[in-house]
Amino acid sequence: MRTPILAANWKMHKNVGEAVAFVEEFLPLVADAEGVEMVLAPPFTALDRVGQTLAGSAVKLASQNVNPEAKGAFTGEIAPGMLVDLGCAYAIVGHSERRHIYGEDDTLVARKAAALLAEDIRPIVCVGETLDQREANRTFDVIGGQLEGSLAEVDPARAEDVVLAYEPVWAIGTGRTATPEIAQEVHAFIREGLAKRFGERASQIRIQYGGSVKPDNVYELMAQPDIDGALVGGASLEPESFSRIVLFDRQGSA
Ligand code: PGA
């Protein structure tokens, strides 16, 4: 059984006060949520206070990025051990904004994933094709390459501690969601790729979908056999909206 994992990626939104206010409003809304894992990824500056406010709840803390080195002269960077200090259970790596705006490649993503696992933080490894790549029928090549490269340093014994996130770049922040069928097709392809690399363990690895997930489309996405959760940007910024996503709101679905 794969426990669904719903994660909020706040990106560069919310100061400390706004982040704490979100948590205070969100926790009562999801107090009865069962059988799902809930994760919040605030900006680095809010991790500490959000972590303190989450203490004793079922909601877990994540960072949006990490540096693979343990310490040293890396101005402006944050090491995995520093995230352990703050109580992070997860960290997002290889988000398309990191890949496209900051030039991160699979080799760096692979090092980050391995460095996190070494500190017992679970990496959420993002992959996804651009619109040009999809239109050129290169989706599977691109995703296959990203998977192989980004997971190259993951010890197979730790495979279940990795979460994948399929985020088609053309669906991120655009309001354009992949249909459940399109998403499922890629998720199934990702699971096959994971099986080649990790064997039977692949059936235990969660694969999130990300890209304009909202309360009114989460139910249909989550109904797909290989979609095990969601990584949510815009619709995770309001407590009510994200709580409906966490509860796979049926009413909102068409
Ligand atoms: P979105 O972002 O939900 O705003 O499309 C998803 C993401 O980038 O993780």
Image (tube, rainbow, N blue to C red):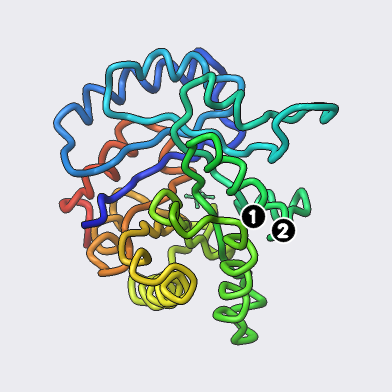
Question: Depth check: 123 or 6 in front?
Answer: 123
| Percent position of residue 126, x then y | 54, 56
Q: Residue at x 44, y 74 (%)?
A: 186
Query: What's the residue type where badge 1 is placed?
Result: Ala
Q: Residue at x 42, y 13 (%)?
A: 52
The relative height of residue 236 versus residue 43 in the rendered view (above or below) is below
Residue identified by numbered label 2: 107
Q: Residue at x 61, y 23 (%)?
A: 82
Residue identified by numbered label 1: 110
> Is 21 displayed left or right of 138 in the figure?
left
C-alpha gap between disc 2 and disc 1: 5 Å
> Is 56 displayed left or right of 197 in the figure?
left
The relative height of residue 151 versus residue 122 in the rendered view (above or below) is below
Quarter of the picture containing the N terminus is bottom left
The relative height of residue 248 versus residue 244 in the rendered view (above or below) is below
Mark 2 surroundings within 10 Å by alpha-carbon count, few (fewer than 14), some (14 through 19), many (20 or more): some
Mark 1 surroundings within 10 Å by alpha-carbon count, few (fewer than 14), some (14 through 19), many (20 or more): many
| Percent position of residue 182, x then y | 40, 76
Asked if disc 2 and disc 1 are in contact, CB closer than 8 Å, the reply is yes
The relative height of residue 15 versus residue 94 in the rendered view (above or below) is above
Element marked by disc 1: helix
Question: Depth check: 101 or 191 in front?
Answer: 191
| Percent position of residue 59, x then y | 32, 29
| Percent position of residue 34, x then y | 16, 39
Question: Depth check: 223 or 105 in front?
Answer: 105
